[in-house]
Amino acid sequence: MSLELVVVIPAYNEEECIQQVVAHWINGISTYVSPDKFKLLIINDGSKDRTGAILDEISGIYPNLMAKHQLNGGHGNAVVNGYRMAVEMNPTYVFQTDSDDQFDVKDFGNFWEKRNQSDFILGYRKVRHDDPFRLVITRILKFSLLFIYGTYIDDANIPFRLFKTSFLKKLLHALPVHTPFAPNIFLAVLAKKSGQNLFNIPVIHKERETGEVSIRHFKLLKVCWQSFKELVAFRVHLNSLVKEITQGK
Protein backbone atom coordinates (compact mmCIF):
# COMPACT_ATOMS: atom_id res chain seq x y z
CA MET A 1 0.00 0.00 0.00
CA SER A 2 1.39 3.38 -1.01
CA LEU A 3 2.26 5.96 1.62
CA GLU A 4 0.53 9.29 1.85
CA LEU A 5 2.98 10.94 4.26
CA VAL A 6 6.45 10.59 5.76
CA VAL A 7 7.33 12.78 8.76
CA VAL A 8 11.08 13.47 8.97
CA ILE A 9 12.49 14.22 12.43
CA PRO A 10 16.24 14.61 13.10
CA ALA A 11 17.26 13.80 16.68
CA TYR A 12 20.39 14.42 18.73
CA ASN A 13 20.70 13.73 22.45
CA GLU A 14 16.97 13.82 23.20
CA GLU A 15 16.71 10.81 25.54
CA GLU A 16 14.51 12.73 27.99
CA CYS A 17 11.73 13.39 25.50
CA ILE A 18 12.18 11.21 22.41
CA GLN A 19 9.60 8.59 23.41
CA GLN A 20 7.10 11.32 24.24
CA VAL A 21 7.76 13.00 20.88
CA VAL A 22 7.23 9.74 19.00
CA ALA A 23 3.94 9.06 20.77
CA HIS A 24 2.80 12.66 20.37
CA TRP A 25 3.37 12.75 16.62
CA ILE A 26 2.16 9.26 15.78
CA ASN A 27 -1.05 9.72 17.75
CA GLY A 28 -1.54 13.23 16.39
CA ILE A 29 -0.89 12.43 12.73
CA SER A 30 -3.28 9.47 13.02
CA THR A 31 -6.16 11.95 13.35
CA TYR A 32 -5.39 13.30 9.86
CA VAL A 33 -3.84 10.36 8.00
CA SER A 34 -4.77 6.68 8.20
CA PRO A 35 -2.17 4.86 10.40
CA ASP A 36 -1.27 2.50 7.56
CA LYS A 37 -0.60 5.46 5.26
CA PHE A 38 2.22 7.30 7.07
CA LYS A 39 5.64 6.72 8.64
CA LEU A 40 7.58 8.64 11.27
CA LEU A 41 11.21 8.66 10.06
CA ILE A 42 13.61 9.67 12.84
CA ILE A 43 17.25 10.28 11.95
CA ASN A 44 19.39 9.68 15.03
CA ASP A 45 22.39 11.93 14.32
CA GLY A 46 25.02 10.10 16.34
CA SER A 47 23.47 10.85 19.73
CA LYS A 48 25.84 10.31 22.67
CA ASP A 49 23.03 9.53 25.12
CA ARG A 50 20.36 6.81 24.97
CA THR A 51 18.31 8.38 22.17
CA GLY A 52 19.25 5.66 19.68
CA ALA A 53 18.71 2.84 22.17
CA ILE A 54 15.29 4.18 23.15
CA LEU A 55 14.24 4.42 19.50
CA ASP A 56 15.25 0.81 18.95
CA GLU A 57 13.41 -0.28 22.10
CA ILE A 58 10.12 1.37 21.12
CA SER A 59 10.21 0.46 17.43
CA GLY A 60 8.25 -2.69 18.21
CA ILE A 61 5.57 -0.67 19.98
CA TYR A 62 5.01 1.77 17.11
CA PRO A 63 4.71 0.14 13.66
CA ASN A 64 4.75 3.63 12.11
CA LEU A 65 8.21 4.38 13.51
CA MET A 66 11.34 4.04 11.39
CA ALA A 67 14.60 4.86 13.18
CA LYS A 68 17.77 5.40 11.15
CA HIS A 69 21.14 5.84 12.85
CA GLN A 70 24.04 7.78 11.40
CA LEU A 71 27.37 9.22 12.51
CA ASN A 72 27.05 12.75 13.79
CA GLY A 73 26.94 15.10 10.82
CA GLY A 74 24.99 18.01 12.26
CA HIS A 75 21.34 19.01 12.08
CA GLY A 76 21.42 20.10 8.43
CA ASN A 77 23.03 16.87 7.31
CA ALA A 78 20.47 14.81 9.25
CA VAL A 79 17.59 16.81 7.75
CA VAL A 80 18.78 16.35 4.16
CA ASN A 81 19.49 12.65 4.68
CA GLY A 82 16.00 12.31 6.12
CA TYR A 83 14.50 14.08 3.12
CA ARG A 84 16.37 11.83 0.70
CA MET A 85 15.28 8.68 2.54
CA ALA A 86 11.70 9.94 2.62
CA VAL A 87 11.70 10.65 -1.12
CA GLU A 88 12.93 7.10 -1.78
CA MET A 89 9.90 5.82 0.13
CA ASN A 90 7.74 7.66 -2.44
CA PRO A 91 4.97 9.11 -0.27
CA THR A 92 2.69 11.80 -1.66
CA TYR A 93 3.87 14.29 0.98
CA VAL A 94 6.85 14.83 3.28
CA PHE A 95 6.62 16.84 6.51
CA GLN A 96 9.57 17.90 8.68
CA THR A 97 9.75 18.92 12.30
CA ASP A 98 12.24 18.63 15.19
CA SER A 99 12.59 16.23 18.11
CA ASP A 100 12.91 18.75 20.96
CA ASP A 101 9.16 18.75 21.73
CA GLN A 102 8.78 22.48 21.07
CA PHE A 103 6.05 22.09 18.42
CA ASP A 104 2.46 20.88 18.64
CA VAL A 105 1.11 18.31 16.20
CA LYS A 106 -2.28 20.06 16.31
CA ASP A 107 -0.81 22.79 14.08
CA PHE A 108 -0.14 20.15 11.42
CA GLY A 109 -3.86 20.11 10.63
CA ASN A 110 -3.72 23.66 9.23
CA PHE A 111 -1.00 22.54 6.82
CA TRP A 112 -2.78 19.35 5.82
CA GLU A 113 -5.95 21.26 4.95
CA LYS A 114 -4.00 23.39 2.44
CA ARG A 115 -1.89 20.58 0.98
CA ASN A 116 -3.60 20.80 -2.43
CA GLN A 117 -3.09 24.56 -2.66
CA SER A 118 0.73 24.64 -2.68
CA ASP A 119 3.62 22.21 -3.19
CA PHE A 120 5.45 23.78 -0.24
CA ILE A 121 3.84 25.12 2.94
CA LEU A 122 5.82 26.84 5.66
CA GLY A 123 5.08 27.79 9.25
CA TYR A 124 6.39 30.61 11.36
CA ARG A 125 6.86 30.96 15.10
CA LYS A 126 4.64 33.89 16.03
CA VAL A 127 6.01 33.79 19.59
CA ARG A 128 9.43 32.20 19.75
CA HIS A 129 10.77 30.69 22.96
CA ASP A 130 14.52 30.93 22.41
CA ASP A 131 17.24 32.85 24.20
CA PRO A 132 17.66 36.55 23.20
CA PHE A 133 20.92 35.94 21.34
CA ARG A 134 19.29 33.39 19.04
CA LEU A 135 16.36 35.73 18.42
CA VAL A 136 18.73 38.50 17.30
CA ILE A 137 20.49 36.11 14.91
CA THR A 138 17.12 35.08 13.49
CA ARG A 139 16.21 38.71 12.80
CA ILE A 140 19.56 39.26 11.07
CA LEU A 141 18.93 36.21 8.92
CA LYS A 142 15.49 37.46 7.91
CA PHE A 143 16.86 40.73 6.60
CA SER A 144 19.90 39.03 5.06
CA LEU A 145 17.54 37.04 2.84
CA LEU A 146 15.78 40.25 1.87
CA PHE A 147 19.11 41.90 1.05
CA ILE A 148 20.66 38.97 -0.83
CA TYR A 149 17.63 37.54 -2.62
CA GLY A 150 15.03 40.29 -2.48
CA THR A 151 12.81 37.76 -0.70
CA TYR A 152 11.11 38.23 2.66
CA ILE A 153 10.28 35.04 4.53
CA ASP A 154 9.02 35.23 8.10
CA ASP A 155 10.79 32.13 9.42
CA ALA A 156 12.91 30.58 6.65
CA ASN A 157 14.63 28.00 8.86
CA ILE A 158 11.61 26.77 10.83
CA PRO A 159 11.45 22.98 11.22
CA PHE A 160 7.73 22.88 10.48
CA ARG A 161 7.13 22.48 6.75
CA LEU A 162 5.11 20.36 4.33
CA PHE A 163 6.31 19.36 0.86
CA LYS A 164 4.68 17.59 -2.02
CA THR A 165 7.23 14.86 -2.68
CA SER A 166 7.49 15.56 -6.41
CA PHE A 167 8.44 19.17 -5.58
CA LEU A 168 10.85 18.17 -2.81
CA LYS A 169 12.75 16.04 -5.33
CA LYS A 170 13.33 19.13 -7.47
CA LEU A 171 14.44 21.17 -4.46
CA LEU A 172 16.92 18.51 -3.32
CA HIS A 173 18.36 18.33 -6.82
CA ALA A 174 18.97 22.09 -6.66
CA LEU A 175 20.81 22.00 -3.29
CA PRO A 176 24.59 22.50 -3.37
CA VAL A 177 26.58 19.24 -3.53
CA HIS A 178 28.08 20.10 -0.15
CA THR A 179 25.13 20.17 2.25
CA PRO A 180 24.72 23.73 3.59
CA PHE A 181 24.73 24.29 7.33
CA ALA A 182 21.05 25.28 7.20
CA PRO A 183 19.55 23.57 4.13
CA ASN A 184 15.99 24.44 5.11
CA ILE A 185 16.76 28.11 4.41
CA PHE A 186 17.84 27.30 0.86
CA LEU A 187 14.76 25.15 0.28
CA ALA A 188 12.48 27.95 1.50
CA VAL A 189 14.15 30.51 -0.77
CA LEU A 190 13.97 28.20 -3.81
CA ALA A 191 10.30 27.47 -3.14
CA LYS A 192 9.44 31.14 -2.75
CA LYS A 193 11.39 32.17 -5.85
CA SER A 194 9.76 29.42 -7.90
CA GLY A 195 6.32 30.88 -7.18
CA GLN A 196 5.01 28.70 -4.38
CA ASN A 197 2.50 30.18 -1.92
CA LEU A 198 4.24 29.40 1.38
CA PHE A 199 1.20 30.58 3.38
CA ASN A 200 3.48 31.26 6.42
CA ILE A 201 1.05 29.65 8.85
CA PRO A 202 1.52 30.63 12.52
CA VAL A 203 2.45 27.71 14.77
CA ILE A 204 2.91 27.27 18.51
CA HIS A 205 6.51 27.23 19.72
CA LYS A 206 6.87 25.92 23.27
CA GLU A 207 9.71 26.40 25.71
CA ARG A 208 12.27 23.61 25.69
CA GLU A 209 11.78 21.52 28.82
CA THR A 210 14.42 18.83 28.26
CA GLY A 211 17.92 18.59 26.83
CA GLU A 212 19.85 21.64 25.68
CA VAL A 213 20.48 23.57 22.48
CA SER A 214 23.57 22.12 20.79
CA ILE A 215 24.67 25.41 19.17
CA ARG A 216 25.02 28.34 21.51
CA HIS A 217 26.25 31.93 21.45
CA PHE A 218 29.77 32.21 19.95
CA LYS A 219 29.43 28.94 18.05
CA LEU A 220 26.02 30.08 16.80
CA LEU A 221 27.50 33.36 15.60
CA LYS A 222 30.27 31.44 13.82
CA VAL A 223 27.92 29.09 11.98
CA CYS A 224 25.61 31.97 11.07
CA TRP A 225 28.53 33.72 9.40
CA GLN A 226 29.21 30.47 7.55
CA SER A 227 25.57 30.32 6.48
CA PHE A 228 25.66 33.94 5.31
CA LYS A 229 28.65 33.17 3.07
CA GLU A 230 26.84 30.10 1.70
CA LEU A 231 23.76 32.20 0.94
CA VAL A 232 25.85 34.77 -0.95
CA ALA A 233 27.56 32.03 -2.99
CA PHE A 234 24.23 30.36 -3.71
CA ARG A 235 22.84 33.61 -5.09
CA VAL A 236 25.01 33.26 -8.21
CA HIS A 237 23.20 30.08 -9.27
CA LEU A 238 19.72 30.94 -8.01
CA ASN A 239 18.09 32.06 -11.27
CA SER A 240 19.17 29.00 -13.23
CA LEU A 241 18.10 26.67 -10.43
CA VAL A 242 14.68 28.31 -10.15
CA LYS A 243 14.29 27.98 -13.92
CA GLU A 244 15.01 24.25 -13.72
CA ILE A 245 12.48 23.84 -10.91
CA THR A 246 9.69 25.76 -12.62
CA GLN A 247 10.28 24.01 -15.96
CA GLY A 248 10.23 20.63 -14.28
CA LYS A 249 13.72 19.54 -15.36
Image (tube, helix red, strand yellow):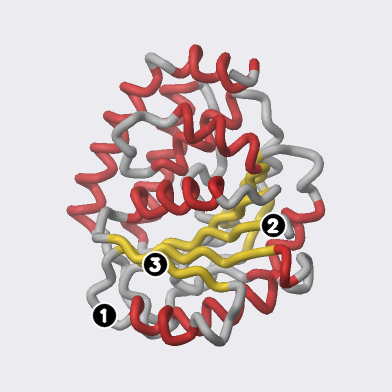
User: What residue is drawn where x is 38% and y is 14%?
Assistant: 236
Q: Quadrant of residue 3?
A: bottom right
Q: Residue 127's x, y, as percent? A: 56, 61
Q: Amino acid at mark 2?
A: Leu
User: What residue is drawn where x is 42% and y is 31%?
Assistant: 175
* Distance CA(mark 3)–CA(mark 1): 11 Å
2 vs 3, front mark: 2
User: What residue is drawn where x is 64% and y is 20%?
Assistant: 248
Q: Quadrant of residue 196?
A: top right
Q: Residue tagged by mark 2?
A: 3
Q: Nearer the viewer, residue 212 or 61?
A: 61
Task: Tell me the SS state at disc 1.
Answer: loop
- The answer to whether 199 is drawn above or below residue 232 in the figure is below
Q: Residue tagged by mark 1?
A: 49
- The answer to whether 246 is drawn above or below residue 114 in the figure is above
1 vs 2, front mark: 2
Q: Residue tagged by mark 3?
A: 11
Tell me, yes or no, whether the two marked residues, 2 and 3, touch with CB atoms within 8 Å: no
Q: Residue 83's x, y, as percent? A: 49, 48
Left or right: 143 in relation to 214: right
Q: Amino acid at mark 3?
A: Ala
Q: Amino acid at mark 1?
A: Asp
Task: Tell me the SS state at disc 2.
Answer: loop
Count neighbours of disc 2 (C-alpha within 10 A) and say few if under 14, some if 14 to 19, many if 20 or more.
some
Tag 1 or tag 3, which sits nearer the N-term?
3
Q: Residue 59's x, y, as percent? A: 50, 80
* Distance CA(mark 1)–CA(mark 2): 32 Å
